[in-house]
Amino acid sequence: MGVGTGRFAAPLGISVGLDPSLPMMEVARGRGVLCVRGVAERLPFRDGPFDLLLMVTVDFLLRDKAAAFREAARVLAPGGSIVVGFIDRDSPLARRYEGEKGWVEGKKGKKGEKEGRKGMRGKDQAGFYGDARFLSPEEMAALLEGAGFWELAFAQTLFSQPEEMTSLQPPIPGYGRGSFVVVRGERL
């Protein structure tokens, strides 16, 4: 769900992706991913054809998160898994993105400081995360459990700002320290 350009799907061998953006789907197709146009809240698939569903940094773009996760459960076969990668709302990276929301880089001020205009929203005006509403791991767990997923397992990584990384940061179990969290759940 939310295959975008196939950046994650292609290297992971995921063959089918869904996205509402035709330009992004074209890039994903070029990476070998079969793309279907649609939205997560109304998946254009029959019940139960998939064993695995992957969402990476998609949750904050969803208009109705609960409906999207119910749809994910519907299209997964019994015992199928969902894997969701998301930015932890309480992390330093999310706080940074929240601080940047609504600001448009403007001209240099008299002292060389950047000035901006508050109130411009949307990804064209305020970057990719302009309309983001990040979730905490607890909120994500509640949504997944509410949609019928169980045995949730969390892992985390990204323990510094991305531009400060000098080496691979291996994931560790749980959440609360890393800005990027991955949760896996199984469909009942």
Image (cartoon, helix red, strand yellow):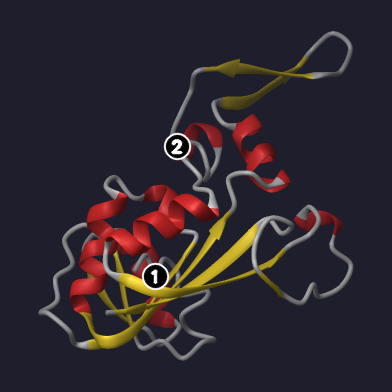
Q: Nearer the viewer, residue 113 or 151?
A: 151
Location of residue 40 (image quadrant):
bottom left
Which quadrant, please, contains the C terminus?
A: bottom left
Seen at 27% across and 47% down, the residue is 64
Taking 31 as reference, is 76 left or right?
left
- Which x, y percent locates residue 180? 64, 61
Disc 2, SS:
loop
Q: Which quarter of the rendered picture does the N terminus lie within?
A: bottom left
User: SS for tag 1?
Assistant: loop
Q: Residue furthest top?
A: 110
Q: Earlier in the sequence, mark 2 or mark 1?
A: 1
Q: Residues within 10 Å of mark 1 (few under 14, many from 20)?
A: many
Q: Amino acid at mark 1?
A: Val
Q: Measured along the vertical axis of the image, is residue 187 above or below residue 177?
A: below
For residue 92, above or below residue 42: above
* Amino acid at pointer 2: Asp
Q: Which residue is mark 2?
A: 131
